[in-house]
Amino acid sequence: MLPRLIVGNWKMHKTVQEACELVQAVLAVLKLPQHVEAAVAPPFTALHAVGEVIAGSPLRLAAQNVCWETEGAFTGEISPHMLHALGCQYVIIGHSERRRLFGETDAMINKKVKAALQSALSPILCVGETFEEREAGDTEQIVQRQTVQGLEGISPEDLQRVTIAYEPVWAIGTGLAATTTQAEAVHQMIHETLRHRWGESGAHVRILYGGSVTPANAPELFQSAHINGALVGKACLDPDAFAMIIRTA
Ligand code: PGA
């Protein structure tokens, strides 16, 4: 069983200096239990500086997005190779904000996942349904499609370096987290889908829950053996709250 993984997604917050202050504050209160991994995902501009602050600590570095190309004429893009050279271990791919606001499709996301794996990064593939899709009873179909198409062509060996984050869109930034029962049902369904497609290695893929995770709801969420960690947005900008969620894991 892989350790639980807690990732703080800082989104578009913090200048370089503010980022260093935040991560120092996290380190000051961080108690990383055994069998728990933790990572922070600052914006691209702060990756280098944050990487220097956390060097030698148990905190890992993650990026929030990546290009599928290695180098070349791709103005404004950052390659997996560049992230790896900065010390990133993880990269979040296909976050619902990228899908919804920046037009990322399952095909683009699949190229990013493959490129990340080729550069020895561990992709965190985000999947999740909107409120309307859940209301229409389409959760399973949507999440299955995002999972299977996002991971199309990945070998069972490479799958072992993939993490999935189930993030219902209606729970992100709304304060309305999924219940443990709701999350657990989808996590189980994702594990079954992976096992069906990739065999036993599918059963060992970590599935994080994301969407309004707080120190208050983390204890209940982590009671489920199917919830292998969390992708934390708002609460990770508060060092005490982030450290508390990690301790709860
Ligand atoms: P939230 O964001 O914790 O603020 O809901 C989670 C995410 O978008 O990853």
Image (spheres, rainbow, N blue to C red):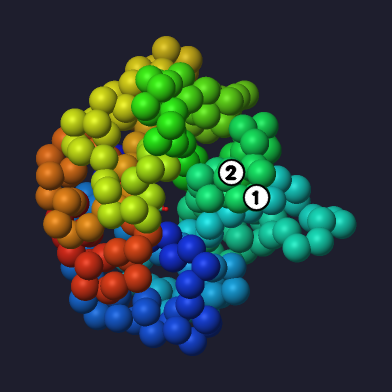
Residue at position x 21%, y 73% in the image? 240
- The residue closer to the viewer here, 97 or 74, is 97
Residue type pointed to by label 1: Phe
Q: Check the image and report above or below for 198 versus 174.
A: above
Residue 95 seen anywhere in this rendered image of the structure: yes
**Quarter residue 83 falls in:** bottom right
Which residue in the structure is indicated by mark 2? 99
Q: Amino acid at mark 2?
A: Arg
Query: Label 2 to label 1, Cα distance in Å?
Result: 6 Å
Nearest the eye: 11 or 195: 11
Return the mark for residue 224. Answer: none
x, y percent for residue 218: 18, 51
Task: Looking at the picture, tell me which residue is in the foreground, 219 or 69.
Answer: 219
| Residue 69: x %, y % from top left | 75, 48
Of 239 and 71, which appears nearest the observer?
Answer: 239
Sort mark 1 into few (<14), some (14-19) or many (20+) by Cα contacts within 10 Å: few
Question: Does the Cβ of the disc 2 residue fall within 8 Å of ligand 1?
Answer: no
Which residue, given by chain and number where applicable, does mark 1 sit on? 102
State whether residue 61 appears in this view. Answer: no
Tell which residue pokes out farthest to the right in this image.
Answer: 73
Mark 2, Cα crowd under 10 Å, few <14 / some 14-19 / many 20+, is: some
Question: Considering the numbered disc 1 on the image, is that residue within a helix, a strand or a loop?
Answer: helix
Please give the name of the residue rendered at 52% of the width and 29% of the height, measured from the top-left corner: 146
Q: Do labels 2 and 1 touch, CB within 8 Å? A: yes
